[in-house]
C-alpha cells in the first residue's frame, strides 16, 4: 500500500479537531482492519532530459493500493447542452448502491450567492449598465420577526462605491440587497420564473441572497439562458421515441427544420421554438460579468490552467451548509453542489470557491479535452467599450448602444438604508437569522 497517498488526509479526529499527520502506515491501520482501497495503475518510467533523450531514465511506479474512505459529505453535478437542454451527464451522489436519492434532480437546497446573477440580469434588463456605481454599506430591513441586518462574507461593513462588475466579482451581499430594492423583488421573481429556476418565488428580500430552494438541474438550466442568448431550455434526458417498427413518433427538437428532406432546390429553414426568457443583450452582459468572477473574483479556481473562456458564480450558504459553483462555456453548462444530506456546516471557511469550483474545473477539463477554445458570441447591437478595471486591467465592457455614459446617480445613496415590511421596492426578509442565504 502506498503511504504517500494517505498522509495528507488520514489524520485522527478527536472532539472535532484533527490530529497530527501520520508518519507511517502503522499510525493509520493495524493488522486485521477492513479498509477501503483504490487500485492505482502502474506508471511507466520516462526518459531523462539529456540530448536525444539519452539522459537518466526516471523510475516508474508499480501498480499499488491507496487507502480510501466512504465520504460523509455528498455532492451532485448536472451538465447540459445550453443550446438544446440535452443532459450530457448527471451525478446524484457518491454511490447509487448506498442511496437511490438523486441529489441533482430531487434535492432542494439553498443556492446562496449562485442566485445573485438572476438579480443582476434583472437590473441589466431594466437598463442599468454594468459600470453603474452601487453603494456597499450597511442595510437594515424591518421584518415581523425583528430587524434584519445582512452582512458581507468578509465581515466588512462598507467598501464604499463599487461598480456592478466589482460587486459581482467580489460577491458583495450588501450591494445585492440594495440592487434588489432598486429593481424590485416582483421583477426578480418574474425573471427566475421565466428561467424555470423557482416557479413561484416569495417576494422576500432575503431571496436575493439565495435563501430560496432550487435543484442542481434547475440551476444548470437557468444559467444556460445566459450563454444561449436568453432562450429558456428544458433539461431533457430523452432524444426521441420510436414505435416497434422504428418510426419516430416523438423527437425532442428545440430547433425544427422546415423543408428538410423535401425540396432540395431551396435551403432548409431552422425554426427556433425556444422561449425567449431574457433580453439577449442583458444575457450577454451577464456572461461578461460572470467571466470576471472566474478571471478575477471568487471563482478563479474554476478556470485555472484551462486557457479557454469560462464564466460562472460561486455560492455558499449560511454556516457553510451548501457549496455551489455553476459555470459554463459556449458548449456546456455545469452545476456543482457539495454538502451534507442533513444540512449542517461543512466547516469554517468551506466555500463554493474552495470546494465546488475545483470540481467544476475537473469536470470541464474532462468534458472539453482536446477541443479548441470557443469564444462567447455577442448578440447584434452590443457596444463593446474598452475600460480599465479597479486593478488596472483593460477589458471590453458590453453596453447597450448609446448607454456607455448613461450610468445613473449612485444607487443606494450615502446613508444607511432601511426598508419597511411590504415596501414597494424591497419586499421583506423571511426571518432575521438563517434567511441570509448568499455569503460567498
Image (cartoon, rainbow, N blue to C red):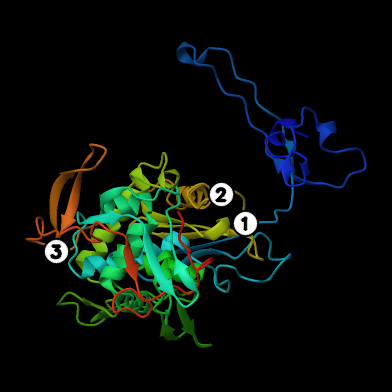
Q: Do the residues labelled 1 and 2 touch (CB within 8 Å)?
A: yes
Q: Are marks 3 and 1 in contact (CB under 8 Å)?
A: no
Decide if residue 410 is on the left or right side of residue 44.
Answer: left
Q: Earlier in the sequence, mark 1 or mark 2?
A: 1
Q: Provide residue 121's location: percent of width, then percent of height.
A: 28, 66
Residue 288 seen in the current view = no
**Mark 3 nearby-residue class (10 Å; few <14, some 14–19, many ≥20):** few
Q: Provide residue 113's location: percent of width, then percent of height.
A: 43, 60
Q: Provide residue 9's location: percent of width, then percent of height.
A: 69, 39
Q: What element carries label 3?
A: loop
Given this view, does label 2 or label 3 mark the residue nearer the observer? 2
Identify the residue under disc 1: 345
Quadrant where the C terminus sits is bottom left
**Residue 421 location, quadrant:** bottom left
187 versus 245 height, above or below: above
Q: Which of marks 3 and 1 is nearer the N terminus?
A: 1
Decide if residue 118 is on the left or right side of residue 357.
Answer: left
Extreme residue toward the right, this view: 32
Decide if residue 129 is on the left or right side of residue 30.
Answer: left
Q: Which of 98 and 353 is in front in this view?
A: 353
Q: Nearer the viewer, residue 286 or 238?
A: 286
Q: Nearer the viewer, residue 360 or 438?
A: 438
Identify the residue under disc 3: 380
**Mark 1 nearby-residue class (10 Å; few <14, some 14–19, many ≥20):** some
**Cα–Cα gap, marks 2 and 3:** 41 Å
Q: Looking at the image, which residue is at 45% across and 68% down?
A: 147
Q: Do the residues labelled 2 and 3 touch (CB within 8 Å)?
A: no
Identify the residue under disc 2: 350
Q: Earlier in the sequence, mark 2 or mark 3?
A: 2
Amino acid at each position: 500500500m502506498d503511504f504517500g497517498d494517505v498522509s495528507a488526509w488520514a489524520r485522527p479526529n478527536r472532539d472535532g479537531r484533527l490530529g497530527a499527520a501520520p508518519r507511517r502506515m502503522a499510525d493509520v491501520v493495524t493488522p486485521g482492519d477492513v479498509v477501503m482501497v483504490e487500485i492505482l495503475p502502474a506508471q511507466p518510467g520516462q526518459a531523462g532530459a539529456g540530448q536525444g533523450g539519452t539522459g537518466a531514465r526516471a523510475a516508474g511506479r508499480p501498480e499499488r493500493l491507496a487507502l480510501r474512505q466512504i465520504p460523509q459529505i455528498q455532492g451532485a453535478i448536472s451538465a447540459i447542452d445550453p443550446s438544446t437542454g440535452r443532459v450530457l451527464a448527471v451525478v446524484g451522489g457518491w454511490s447509487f448502491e448506498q442511496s437511490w436519492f438523486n441529489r441533482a434532480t430531487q434535492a432542494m437546497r439553498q443556492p446562496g450567492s449562485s442566485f445573485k446573477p438572476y438579480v443582476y440580469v434583472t437590473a441589466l434588463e431594466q437598463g442599468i449598465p454594468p459600470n453603474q456605481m452601487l453603494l456597499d454599506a450597511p442595510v437594515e430591513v424591518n421584518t415581523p420577526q425583528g430587524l434584519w441586518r445582512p452582512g458581507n462574507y468578509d465581515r466588512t461593513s462598507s467598501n464604499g462605491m463599487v461598480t456592478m462588475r466589482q460587486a459581482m466579482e467580489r460577491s458583495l451581499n450588501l450591494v445585492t440587497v440594495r440592487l434588489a430594492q432598486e429593481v424590485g423583488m416582483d421583477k426578480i421573481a418574474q425573471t427566475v420564473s421565466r428561467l424555470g429556476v423557482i416557479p413561484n418565488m416569495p417576494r422576500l428580500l432575503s431571496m436575493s441572497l439565495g435563501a430560496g430552494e432550487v435543484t442542481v438541474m434547475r440551476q444548470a438550466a437557468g444559467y444556460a439562458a445566459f450563454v444561449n442568448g436568453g432562450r429558456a431550455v428544458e433539461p431533457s434526458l430523452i432524444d426521441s421515441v420510436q414505435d416497434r417498427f422504428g418510426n419516430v413518433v416523438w423527437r425532442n427538437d428545440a430547433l425544427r427544420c422546415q423543408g428538410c428532406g423535401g425540396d432540395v432546390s431551396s435551403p432548409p429553414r431552422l425554426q427556433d421554438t425556444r422561449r425567449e426568457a431574457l433580453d439577449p443583450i442583458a444575457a450577454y452582459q451577464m456572461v461578461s460579468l460572470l467571466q470576471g468572477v472566474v478571471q478575477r473574483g471568487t471563482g478563479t479556481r474554476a478556470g485555472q490552467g484551462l486557457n479557454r473562456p469560462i464564466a460562472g458564480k460561486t455560492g455558499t450558504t449560511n454556516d457553510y451548509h451548501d457549496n455551489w459553483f455553476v459555470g459554463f462555456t459556449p458548449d456546456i453548462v455545469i452545476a456543482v453542489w457539495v454538502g451534507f444530506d442533513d444540512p449542517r456546516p461543512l466547516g469554517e471557511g468551506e466555500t463554493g470557491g474552495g470546494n465546488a469550483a475545483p470540481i467544476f474545473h475537473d469536470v470541464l477539463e474532462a468534458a472539453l479535452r482536446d477541443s479548441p477554445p470557443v469564444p462567447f458570441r455577442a448578440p447584434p447591437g452590443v457596444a463593446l467599450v474598452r475600460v480599465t478595471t479597479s486593478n488596472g486591467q483593460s477589458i471590453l465592457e458590453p453596453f447597450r448602444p448609446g448607454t456607455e455614459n448613461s450610468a445613473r446617480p449612485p444607487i443606494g445613496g450615502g446613508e444607511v438604508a432601511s426598508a419597511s415590511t411590504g415596501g414597494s421596492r424591497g419586499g421583506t426578509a423571511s426571518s432575521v437569522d438563517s434567511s441570509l442565504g448568499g455569503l460567498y
